[in-house]
Amino acid sequence: MHGYHLRRLADVPVGDRQVVIDLRVRRLVCPTRGCPRQTFREQVHSVAERYARRTPGLAAMIGDFGVMLAGRAGQAALSRLAVTVSRMTVLRLLMARPIAAQPVPEVLSVDDFALRRGHRYATLLIDAVTHRRIDVLPDRKAATVAAWLREHPGVQIVCRDGSAAYAEGIRQGAPGAVQVSDRWHLWRGLAAAVEKTVTAHSRCWHTGPPRQTGAREERTRQRHAAVHTLLNQGVGLLECARRLGWGLNTVKRYARAATAEDLQRPPQYRSTLVDPYRDHLRRRLSEQGDVPVTHLLAEIRELGYPGSATLLVRYLNQGRADPERTVPSPRRLVSWITRRPEDLAGHQRRHLDDLTASCAQMTALTTRVREFAAILTQRRGKDLDAWITAVQADDLPALHSFVHGLRKDLPAVVAGLTLPYSNGPMEGTNTKVKLIKRQMYGRAGFALLRQRILLS
């Protein structure tokens, strides 16, 4: 022993008070001739690492805050716990953390996320079964994905969206892997084709008997006319809001609508005790428009109505028993067509049947959507060819374009409609990645973002 050396180490605080360890270590002499280090200090690895000014416990704590909050936020949170460090120290300890090597999964999920929306994107890889984050790639090019798959052999199934770049990268890097197209993206593509078809045939289903204008509809017409009168005079949106005394978003909503009818929406009501007798009420009102409410009440009570007269009066005042119905917007009609029939209310189901029955193309569209939904939910990918053939025989150009896209990626689509795997876990991971990215306000580099994604 040559002497002693005193080391001062910061430790995990106790009771919001800083803790400092004064560690006295020995300085030893090496008796070997020609040794480059004639004297050296002994190391106490359970208390301090070489050249460190903090204990391993405090360093791990700072690193945890770096993973959760990054630099400035981590520094601010640590200061509340009596740990005084700079944001660069937090980031340095975060970047010094090793990333454990992950085994290559048999089922891989691939998707992109924006580093800068519309300009730069990165690729996220996770295990589709255990949802473990495997790696983050700096771009979404096919060559990058192919290179990663070559370096990590063993992937048997890859879940992806409809990206052609990912399809080519998987084909090059893992030619034996089965590509699975995500079912959510398939349904989304079908819904877009349905909306185009509904809009193209709006003249078929949007016509109907004239409806009496209520107070709300009349007020909507007046407001729409007032906004467009000012706009035609060259008045700006902000000035319109000031003159009319309305909110700017309200003025924008009226300005975007070409006609007042575009702003009409069917009201949303909850089910009541009167619903089972709606057809009887509508028939009676269509036969005799001025029938007294007391007569209607007596008639439905004979049919088993257990409710009160007040409930019936409110029901009639809301117009829920009127023979005429408000025509839904194209987007709402699309939601009715793409929803499970059993999830629709009775009056919505009847309204949908009436609207689609007025047009042969709309009837065929509804049938094809429900057939595809059965194939998707029941994993009947083998029936896809027959469904595509049936669609091509219909007069539905928008669905023809959708089918053309399916044929270009048919093996992956059939696998997506057959196998139980999907990109669903990836969407949840992407949401968490967006939180991490926005915590850093877009100022951090890719290396730091990758470190936080894989460690969090």
Image (cartoon, rainbow, N blue to C red):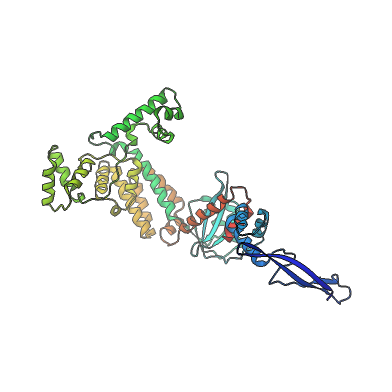
Instruction: Residue 146: name its quadrant.
Output: bottom right
Task: Residue 284: give x, y in percent of width and height.
Answer: 13, 42
Residue positioned 27% across, 41% down in the render: 359
Q: Quadrant of the C terminus?
A: bottom right
Q: Is residue 179 left or right of residue 197?
A: right
- The vertical placement of 243 against 74, above or below, is above
Q: Is residue 235 left or right of residue 369?
A: right
Residue 6 or 364: which is nearer the viewer? 6
Task: Residue 313: give x, y in percent of width and height.
Answer: 19, 43
Residue positioned 34% across, 47% down in the render: 335
Residue 411 or 96: which is nearer the viewer? 96
Asked if residue 2 can be seen in this view, the reply is yes
Q: Quadrant of the N terminus?
A: bottom right
Residue positioned 63% across, 53% down in the render: 71
Task: Residue 439: give x, y in percent of width and height.
Answer: 57, 51
Report the residue that reaches farthest toward the right. 33
- The vertical placement of 352 against 385, above or below, is above
- The vertical placement of 156 against 165, above or below, is below
Task: Residue 300: give x, y in percent of width and height.
Answer: 13, 49
